[in-house]
Amino acid sequence: MTPNRGGRRVTNAYLRQLQEAASSGSVHSAAAPSQIEDADEAQNASDIPNHVHLDQENELPGQSLPAETPESTSIHTEPTNPLAASSSTYVADGEGWLRWLGESSTWSFSHKTLMLVRDHLHDQNLPLPNIPLNEESRAYSLSWGSSGFEDPASFSNLPSRDHAIYLLNSVKFHVGSLYHLYEERQFMDLFHAFYDSPVEAGTKNKIWYIQFLALLVLAKAISIQPASGATALPGSEFFLRAIKMLPDPSYLISDALTAVEALCSIALYLQCADQRNAAYIYVKHNA
């Protein structure tokens, strides 16, 4: 028997019955305990522990809310930006690249404003103006390019085709499970084209060539043990060549994905060379 406020008692069996009903989610009315001693218990049922009302359905803690249905738990809502007045908008530039009109960009705000004006003119059956995208690096010419691509020597003194494949497989084995550094099928197509015609393929695919050099030096750094007392990490000669030939950012954006992969390889090599701060700078370029 369990004491209650006011001296009334409720059997433990009845409390267990209520607990079992609560755990099973049952909503049927529970029978009144036969061991309640006072005749006026029905009028003071609110005094029972946990405020159990004998003349109503069980309303134990946790049962006041309706049970979740499969429909309510399966509803999935897309995350939204409460500060954004509209959903994401994309426009294609002259070269077919998609440009995202963000919510906090002045360039995006200007473009959206012009689009609203154009839509209004369309509703009024007025001539529609052409909205320029004003893409990056189009207003002024400021490009320092890269040096070395005009020199055929920049494509010489490289590992043989088979040795280069071995080095690439070393990168894939040691690093591939953690990082995605290149798209293998596309990369290898350009790889074989390069070894068939180094100067032509390297000049035509500048960013890819930087990526190729970066992967070679990373492979040497992780697969070749430096000699005792060495002051340079294996592969440093190819690394310096890649850095000197690295195009400026306005050119890197022309093949952004390959550029990101190449800069990641450069950053990993700098980590191997104990140049952590320099590695952070090249990783920052990827942003």
Image (spheres, helix red, strand yellow):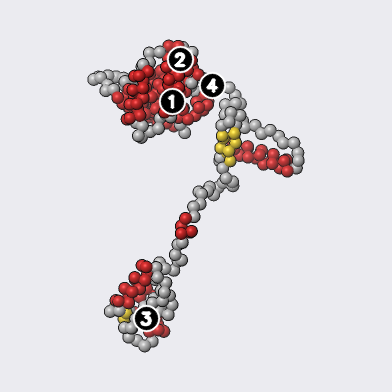
Of badges 4 and 2, nearer the viewer stands: 2
Disc 1/disc 3 C-alpha distance (Å): 78 Å
76 lies above or below 42: above
Check disc 3 and report the residue beneath it: 32
Q: Is residue 169 left or right of residue 65?
A: left
Q: Is residue 171 left or right of residue 256?
A: left
Of badges 1 and 3, nearer the viewer stands: 1
Circle 1: residue type: Phe
Circle 4: residue type: Ser
Q: Residue at x 37, y 73 (%)?
A: 50
Front one among 131 and 66? 66
Front one among 166 and 254? 166
Q: Residue at x 60, y 31 (%)?
A: 93
Q: Residue at x 38, y 24 (%)?
A: 215
Of badges 3 and 2, nearer the viewer stands: 2
Q: Quadrant of the N terminus?
A: bottom left
- Callout 1 touching callout 3 (CB < 8 Å): no
Report x, y in % for residue 126.
75, 38
For this orientation, the residue located farthest to the right is: 125
Of badges 3 and 4, nearer the viewer stands: 3
- Callout 1 touching callout 4 (CB < 8 Å): no
Circle 2: residue type: Ser
> Which quarter of the picture shows residue 62?
bottom left
Check disc 2 and report the residue beneath it: 197
Q: Choose the circle earlier in sequence order: 1 or 3.
A: 3
Q: Residue at x 51, y 49 (%)?
A: 78
Disc 3/disc 4 C-alpha distance (Å): 88 Å
Circle 3: residue type: Ala
Disc 1/disc 2 C-alpha distance (Å): 15 Å
Q: Choose the circle earlier in sequence order: 1 or 4.
A: 4
Check disc 1 and report the residue beneath it: 187
